[in-house]
Amino acid sequence: MEDAMAVALRQWRQVLPDADLDTIAVIGRINRCAALLQHAADTPLGRAGVNRAEYDILCALFRVGGELTPGRLARETFASGAAVTKRIKRLEDLGLVARRADERDRRVAHLSLTDSGRDLIRGLLPEQLAYENGLLSGLPDDRERQLAELLAELLLLLEGRLGGMIG
C-alpha cells in the first residue's frame, strides 16, 4: 500500500530522474501528516466551539498557570503577534480569557484564563487527548516513541536554523 507522497515521488522521479528527492519524501510527508492531523484533531475542539489555534492559546495559559503577555503567548504557540491578538480578542469575547493592563506600563497586557476558560480546558483536554491517542493507535508504542524521538531531533535542528523566523 502506498501513501500519497509515494505517488508524488514516483512522478517527480519521472520528470527529474537525477534529483535528490529525499527531502521531499520527509518534508512532504510531515506536511501531509500535519494537514491531516490538524483537520482530524479539530473534531472535539469544534464541538467545544474553539479551533486548534485558540485551543493552543488556552492550553498555554492553563499549563503556565498564571498570566502571560501576548508576546510570550506568541512564543509559546509559535504564532505571530498579530495572530495571537486576533485569537485573544475572540477568546475574550467568548469569556474564556481575561486581560489586565500592567500597572507600570498600560501598553502591556497580562492575559489569563477565566474560570470558564479553566473549566473548558479541564473538560476538553481529556477528550482531546483520547481522540489524538486514537488517531495514533495503529502505531505500536515503541514505534510511536521512536517517531517522537526522531521528530524531536528534527525540531531541534529546525528551531536552531529557523526559530528566530517565527513570530
Image (cartoon, helix red, strand yellow):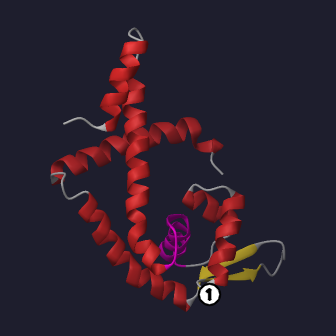
Kindly identify which residue carries mark 1: 95
x%, y% of residue 35?
44, 50
x%, y% of residue 144?
23, 50
x%, y% of residue 114?
58, 87
What is the quadrant of residue 108 in the picture?
Answer: bottom right
Q: Residue at x 30, y 45 (%)?
A: 149
Q: Residue at x 39, y 69 (%)?
A: 43
Span colored in magenta? 49-65
Other-residue count near label 1 (Cα within 10 Å), few / some / many at <14 / 14–19 / ≥20: some
Residue sitting farthest toward the bottom: 115
Could you tell me if residue 21 is visible in this image? no
Horizontal side of residue 122 vs 108, given as left or right: left
Q: Quadrant of the N terminus?
A: top left
What is the quadrant of residue 71 in the picture?
Answer: bottom right
Q: Is residue 63 magenta?
A: yes
Could you tell me if residue 95 is visible in this image? yes
Q: Residue at x 15, y 52 (%)?
A: 140
Prevailing SS of the magenta stretch:
helix
x%, y% of residue 148?
31, 48
Relative to 37, is 30 above or below?
A: above
In the image, 136 versus 12, the foreground residue is 12
Helix, strand or loop status at disc 1: loop
Q: Is residue 14 magenta?
A: no
Relative to 52, is 2 above or below?
A: above
In the image, 19 versus 108, the foreground residue is 19
In the image, 104 versus 148, the foreground residue is 148
In the image, 69 versus 138, the foreground residue is 138
Relative to 148, is 6 above or below?
A: above
Residue type at mark 1?
Answer: Gly
